[in-house]
């Protein structure tokens, strides 16, 4: 009775933190799920988020709830995972929602849009604002329930054979860019290419594309982009803090016990925090290594940033006028973004601006 009282008052997370699975978990059925990732297995950061999630589920269930993780292309194409979850081919997927903007642009709001929010702001909108509620209402149309399961933080702006000097250099540029951002690149005169991470190097090497962005120093170095395009831009104005999601088939999730549902949520949240920490810890050393081996950094010209911002805002207005799903979510997203931007201008930005000028 004391143990049951402890579980009731401390919650599942507290018991698990103490290193023991509660009796109620031991009484659960054995379950086997498959998770389809959109990412290559070589990336312990973004692909690793799925692994971390699956391992935590196993730990918290005393080994009774097992999830096998499959890299992009093993069970289905990297960009086919939403269909796979929707039709029940797999129980869950680990992916970036904006890959699926072709189905509905609203998917992008669950990950990142050009000049959107940074990682902390996105997490705040999801957990303390209306983000998770609104996105789950939208994903329900696809028989999916979502859980935040990672964030990369602000990304770098991609690899180029020649650095961009002005907005004129965007014209005709065949640029691999993640999902929804391609709509803005197109409006700037570029030719966006939506290519899975594991296929980018080959396309860049063969000249199929002129430039490519992926994530940041640690992942980009692993994929070797610096070997074929030595100029590295910053910042990725289209990805201030892209969220990676766990998509779960609604029927599969509903079939779980209350305890297993809580485990899925807790494990996803753990992976969400761990991924951002991993990127923040690994990117600095990787950037130093890239620069020391010949990579040349350049900041996007001011006219590129201003043109991209102008076209992004125009695009969002157009979408709000014709897509009710987008308008419903974006209206709330934009209000939260404005409030966050105002707040960050003072304490956060003030602290960061000063610290980044110091010699440490």
Image: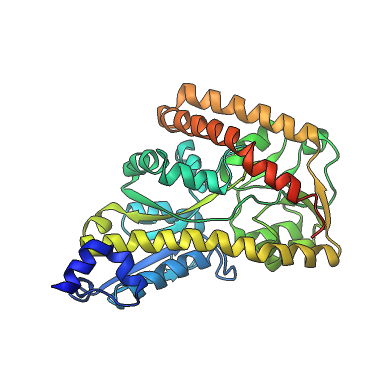
Camera-side residue of 322 and 126:
126
Image quadrant holding the N terminus, namely: bottom left
**Residue 252 at x, y = what percent?**
26, 58
Question: In which image quadrant can residue 219 be found?
Answer: bottom right
Please name whichever residue, 316 or 147, is drawn nearer the observer in this view of the structure: 147
Instruction: Judge whether 77 appears above or below 239 on screen.
Output: below
* Relative side of 6 to 292, left or right: left
Location of residue 17 by image quarter: bottom left
- Classify 9 as above or below 186: below
x and y percent of residue 141 in the render?
Answer: 32, 41
**Res. 138 image quadrant:** top left
Q: Is residue 339 above or below residue 213?
A: above
Describe residue 306's horizontal placement relative to residue 278 as left or right. Answer: right
106 left or right of 30 in image = right
The C terminus lies in quadrant: bottom right
In depth, the one of 66 and 179 nearer the eye is 66
Percent x, y for residue 137? 33, 39
Residue lying farthest to the left in this orientation = 1
- How did the renderer colour the structure? rainbow
**Residue 110 seen in this snapshot:** no
From where the camera sits, is residue 52 visible? yes
In the rendered image, residue 124, in percent from the top left (x then y), is placed at: 47, 44
Q: In the image, what residue occupies the spot 62% across and 31% down? A: 312
């Amino acid at each position: 009775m004391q143990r049951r009282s402890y579980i009731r008052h401390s919650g599942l997370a507290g018991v698990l933190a103490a290193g023991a699975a509660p009796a109620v978990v031991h009484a659960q059925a054995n379950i086997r799920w498959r998770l389809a990732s959109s990412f290559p297995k070589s990336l312990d950061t973004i692909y690793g988020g799925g692994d971390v999630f699956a391992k935590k589920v196993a730990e918290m269930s005393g080994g009774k709830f097992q999830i096998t993780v499959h890299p992009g292309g093993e069970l289905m194409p990297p960009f086919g995972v939403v269909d796979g979850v929707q039709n029940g081919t797999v129980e869950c997927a680990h992916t970036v929602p904006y890959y699926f903007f072709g189905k509905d642009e609203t998917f992008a709001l669950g990950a990142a849009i050009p000049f959107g929010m940074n990682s902390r702001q996105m997490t705040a909108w999801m957990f303390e604002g209306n983000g998770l509620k609104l996105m789950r209402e939208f994903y329900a149309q696809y028989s999916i329930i979502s859980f935040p399961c990672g964030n990369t933080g602000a990304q770098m702006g991609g690899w180029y054979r020649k650095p961009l000097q002005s907005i004129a250099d965007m014209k005709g540029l065949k640029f691999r860019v993640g999902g929804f951002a391609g709509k803005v690149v197109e409006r700037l005169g570029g030719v966006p290419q939506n290519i899975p991470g594991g296929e980018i190097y080959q396309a860049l090497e063969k000249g199929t594309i002129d430039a490519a962005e992926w994530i940041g120093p640690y992942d980009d170095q692993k994929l070797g982009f610096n070997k074929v395009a030595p100029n590295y831009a910053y910042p990725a104005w289209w990805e201030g803090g892209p969220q990676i999601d766990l998509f779960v088939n609604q029927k599969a999730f509903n079939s779980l016990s209350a305890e297993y549902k809580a485990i899925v949520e807790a494990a996803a949240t753990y992976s969400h925090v761990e991924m951002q920490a991993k990127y923040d810890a690994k990117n600095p050393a990787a950037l130093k290594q890239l620069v020391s081996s010949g990579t040349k950094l350049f900041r996007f010209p001011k006219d590129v940033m201003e043109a991209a911002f102008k076209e992004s805002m125009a695009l969002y207005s157009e979408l709000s006028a014709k897509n009710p799903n987008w308008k419903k979510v974006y209206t709330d997203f934009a209000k939260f973004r404005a409030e966050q931007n105002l707040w960050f201008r003072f304490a956060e930005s003030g602290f960061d601006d000063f610290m980044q000028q110091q010699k440490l």
